[in-house]
Amino acid sequence: MLNILIFTVIALIAGYLLGYFFRRYVAERKIQDAEAKVKQILEQAQKEAQDKRREAELESKDLLYRMRQDFERETKDRRQEILNSEKRLAQKEENIDRRLELLERKEKETEGRQENVRKQEEALKAKDSQLNALIAEEKERLQKIASLSAEEAKQILLNRLNEELNAEKAVFIKRQEEELQGTVAKKAREIISLAIQRCAAEHTVESTVSVVALPNDDMKGRVIGREGRNIRALEMATGVDVIIDDTPEAVTLSAFDTLRREIARLSLEKLISDGRIHPGRIEEIVEKTKKEMDEKIREEGERAAFEAGVDNLHPELVKLIGRLRYRTSFGQNALQHSKEVAFLLGVMASEVGLDFKLA
């Protein structure tokens, strides 16, 4: 009986231990399964996060590409609009100049015709007065001759011959003056032709755009800057339009003011060479370039005065002459045109025996 009890107790203890270890095994297995599931969930979450991040990167790149395409298309359209506007303005200026020239010519012709009519009317009135005076004079003379002696009649005849001789002499002098004027006009044309032949001037049409070369296409992005801030800073500092299109390794600057366009071109070249391109640096370089351009304008004025043989000019006048280097008239450089005119006047003065330097 005791053995049965001991066996029963041992069996209970063994059953309890077996159940305890079995439950512990089951619990550990559940924990392992839970940890594996948590790990799987974490890995899945990480994978989904990476997929979403890659998807977001692709979307941002695609958005950036579309924005760049839109910007380049708008820039190209803007450049085309500017070019079309420039062409239209040039055509309008040409038409206006042509109409003004035609109006001035017609006005001069009308004034000339009116002047000729007025002169003819005055001449007719004068001739009519002279004719009436001559008729009256002849009547008076005839009345006097009828009552004069031979000597007195002879004296009157001599006086009339003297008057006729003076009239013929005046006609002869007038004819000689007209012939002399024709000779002088011919000589003047010869002098002008000689001066033009001696002035071998080149004529080049100034453009309203300047092209700045880039070392590579990557530099375009640096010139544009974040959201185009570098372009806006350069446009505000110089007053020119910066055009970036599909042209490889090039940036176009557009402005009717040649001086502003030259300042923008030199500033952009310095920025590209320096490599530091941001709004603050742009303003600094533009201000420095403006000061350099003031000195260059003064040098251009002094050089032009020296070439023309003019000394002791006022400094402000020298600066004004230098500024002509960056001004155009009908597409021609104003300073070059002024030097050509000065040379032509000097040559013509020399041909007629006057002072070349004074002319």
Image (cartoon, rainbow, N blue to C red):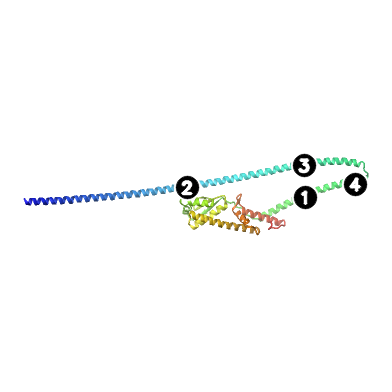
Residue 299 quadrant = bottom right
Question: Within 10 angstroms of label 2, few (less than 14), some, or many (20 or more) residues?
Answer: some
Query: In the image, what residue occupies the spot 8% across and 50% down?
Result: 5
CA separation, marks 1 and 2? 74 Å
Residue 326 at x, y percent in the picture = 59, 53
At x 77% / y 42%, what residue is drawn?
A: 122
Residue carrying label 4 = 155
- Place of residue 81 in the rendered image (x, y in percent of width and height, measured from the top left): 53, 45
* Residue 200 located left or right of residue 282: right
Find disc 2 in the rendering and name its residue: 71
Q: CA distance from mark 1 to mark 4?
A: 33 Å
Helix, strand, or loop for circle 2?
A: helix
From this viewpoint, is residue 71 visible?
Answer: yes
The alpha-carbon separation of the residues under discs 2 and 3 comes to 74 Å
In the picture, the disc for residue 353 is none
Q: State the mark number for residue 122.
A: 3
